[in-house]
Image (spheres, rainbow, N blue to C red):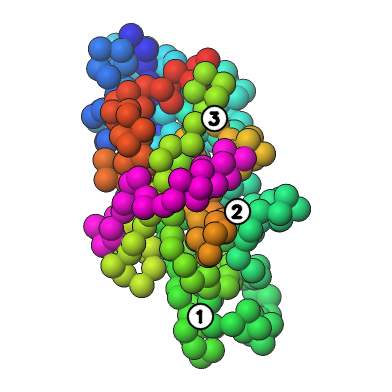
Amino acid sequence: MKNIAILTGGDSAERVISLQSGQVVQEHLPKDRYRSFQIDIQGGDWRERESGALIDKNDFSLRLNGETIRFDCAFAALHGSPLEDGKMQGYFDMIGLPYTCCNGYVSGLTMNKYHTKTVLAPLEVPLAPSVLLRRGEPVDTDRLLEMGLPLFVKPNTHGSSFGVTKVKTADALLPAIEAVWPYDKEALVEAFMPGREFANGALRVNGEIIAMPVTEIIPETEYFDFAAKYEGKSKEITPANLSPELEQQCRERTRMLYEVLNCRGVVRFDYILQGDTFYLLEGNSIPGISPASIVPQQARAHGWELGEFFALLVEESMR
């Protein structure tokens, strides 16, 4: 029986989503193979959720009911900081504890939308035009408006659509930028890409990168915002209604991105399809994993039950 620490909570606005994800993982991990504990990470306060017992940070062990529990794997169910941005992985590397997500460098890179674009642009990956802004620096609105309207303004290193605005008028641009600062020190202003939206998750199993079936996202809201992601305000079709050629193109691009970014665990890439070209929006190194989330939909379409899928991630991390 292996002991699994399910990392949940976190310090960002995505904490509420992480707590839900942690619960889903614990409910579905096969109980005949794993003994799991949700570990709530909040600042320097790391506790087992049910008992409130503190983690010993010297070796990430847990003292519970007179027993010292040492973990075989840390399961990444924490969206945002301090895991999805790569801060914790160096600690796990130092103590030799496997984890089910990308390493610190790759996590930090993929969390930073602008830096990801900078790395991928020389590889001729189709990307939406964008401009990075830093809090406190002057804003050249004329330069931004050269990309045309509407524009998307979003936190550069934050997820779950917190702080994102679709800007339709020039007057709305500066307020949209101001709306980013509670979440991030950097804002990404991105050209609007009309087209169909798709998502595709991938993971490595026995050395092979498997790109799962593609999902089309049809939001009831104006774009794939928080309500569309987490409150059922979107229609998600898995497998997507695509020609075999376009399906193959999307999955091949996902496998290529997973390889060149040196990803680990399950990673989801989001795209806009214009004509016959998939434009990359962003990568998610710890994507949503509630039963209704996109990656679990794709896992089931591939033929994996949720518990089997989570077990694959655990075993792969310890390989």
**Disc number lying in front (3 or 1):** 3
Q: Residue visible at 69% across and 51% down?
A: 120
Mark 2 or mark 3, earlier in chain: 2
The answer to whether 270 is drawn above or below residue 134 in the figure is: above
Viewer-side residue, 248 vs 294: 248
Whether residue 71 is visible here, answered yes or no, is: yes
236 is higher (above) or lower (below) than 175? above
Mark 1 vs mark 2: which is more N-terminal?
Answer: 2
Give the Cα distance between marks 1 and 2: 22 Å
Picture coordinates of residue 232, whole percent (x, y): 24, 57
Q: Earlier in the sequence, mark 3 or mark 1?
A: 1
Q: How many marks?
A: 3
Residue pushed farthest bottom?
171
Please tell me whether residue 186 belongs to the stretch shown in magenta: no
Q: Dot 3 lies on which element?
A: strand
The N terminus is located in which quarter?
A: top left
Question: Which residue is under mark 1?
Answer: 150
Query: Where are the magenta residues, as a range?
Result: 230-256
Instruction: Look at the image and tell me whether residue 106 can be seen.
Output: no
Q: Outermost residue toward the front?
A: 244
List x then y, in percent, for residue 252: 56, 41
Between marks 2 and 3, how big is the CA–CA gap? 23 Å
Q: Which residue is mark 3?
A: 209
Judging depth in this view, the residue of 147 and 248 nearest the camera is 248
Q: Circle 2 is placed at which residue position?
A: 112
Three-letter amino acid code of the residue under disc 3: Ile
